């Protein structure tokens, strides 16, 4: 056992000496770390593009419902409207009052960021009710989230946003490396239906 311990200590000492003496070894290790970091950034870019596509898809679904609201002959469009409405309702944040819907979205986003150890620097919500004027009670909310840039936590948060039952879609993401600390800025979109009591759990 003593011999094994001595051999291990000798190996550690040799490794430390080589690290101190070899500039090439240090540069190679730094290069590997930089490559891993760049790979993580590319992964973030792919995820952001995917969430942006999800947001566009949600907007298209709402636009499909808009002309149906003007349709007078509902008997001809009942089946299509029913299917579209059922699909849309699964994505909505349904609350009896506007303030409750806003609070629910903000609380959920803050809780998800906290679960991934991402300090929230800013969380601000803006209503965009004019986005769907023909659908009473339905409105779009934009959420601006600014957190510390922690790669693993940010990847986890983006993945969770993409699989949530009620949609919080990532419309834009910007990484600010020059700030201290480095920050991630996300613009999120959520669609709420006010006046309908939610019977489903949180996403």
Image (cartoon, rainbow, N blue to C red):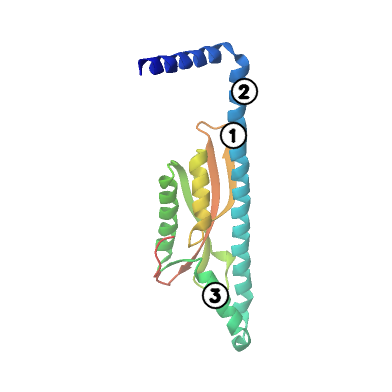
For residue 87, above or below residue 22: below
- Report the mark closest to the observer, 2 or 3: 2
Give the crowd class for mark 1: few <14, some 14-19, many >=20 residues within 10 Å. few
Q: Earlier in the sequence, mark 1 or mark 3?
A: 1
Q: Position of residue 192 (x, y in %)?
A: 49, 65
Q: Secondary structure at mark 2?
A: helix
Viewer can see residue 90: yes
Q: Secondary structure at mark 1?
A: helix
Q: Position of residue 111 (x, y in %)?
A: 40, 50
Query: Residue 69, located in which quarter of the rendered image?
Result: bottom right
Residue placed under numbered mark 1 in the picture? 36
Residue placed under numbered mark 3 in the picture? 85
Q: 112 or 62: nearer the eye?
A: 112
113 horizontally vs 29: left or right = left
Label disc, if present, on residue 28 of the rendered structure: 2
Marks 2 and 3 sit apart, C-alpha to C-alpha, by 57 Å
For residue 79, above or below residue 161: below
For residue 143, above or below residue 72: above
Give the crowd class for mark 3: few <14, some 14-19, many >=20 residues within 10 Å. some
Residue drawn at 41 percent across, 45 percent down: 114
Q: 81 or 196: nearer the eye?
A: 81
Give the crowd class for mark 2: few <14, some 14-19, many >=20 residues within 10 Å. few
Q: Earlier in the sequence, mark 2 or mark 3?
A: 2
Q: Pick out the residue farthest to the left.
A: 1
Query: Residue 103, located in which quarter of the rendered image?
Result: bottom left
Label disc, if present, on residue 181 of the rendered structure: none
Q: Secondary structure at mark 3?
A: helix
Marks 2 and 1 sit apart, C-alpha to C-alpha, by 13 Å
């Amino acid at each position: 056992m003593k011999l094994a311990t001595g051999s291990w200590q000798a190996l550690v000492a040799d490794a430390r000496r080589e690290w101190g003496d070899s500039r090439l070894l240090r540069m190679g290790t730094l290069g590997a770390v930089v490559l891993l970091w760049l790979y993580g950034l590319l992964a973030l870019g792919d995820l952001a593009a995917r969430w942006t596509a999800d947001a566009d898809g949600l907007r298209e679904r709402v636009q499909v419902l808009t002309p149906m609201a003007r349709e007078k002959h509902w008997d001809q469009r009942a089946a299509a409207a029913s299917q579209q409405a059922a699909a849309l309702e699964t994505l909505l944040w349904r609350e009896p009052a506007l303030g409750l819907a806003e609070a629910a979205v903000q609380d959920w986003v803050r809780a998800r960021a906290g679960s991934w150890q991402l300090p929230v620097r800013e969380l601000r919500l803006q209503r965009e009710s004019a986005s769907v004027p023909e659908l009473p009670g339905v409105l779009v909310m934009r959420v601006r989230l600014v957190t510390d840039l922690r790669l693993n936590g940010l990847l986890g948060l983006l993945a969770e946003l993409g699989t949530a039952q009620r949609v919080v879609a990532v419309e834009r993401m910007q990484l600010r490396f020059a700030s201290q600390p480095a920050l991630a800025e996300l613009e999120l979109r959520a669609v709420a239906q006010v006046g309908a009591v939610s019977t489903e759990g949180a996403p």
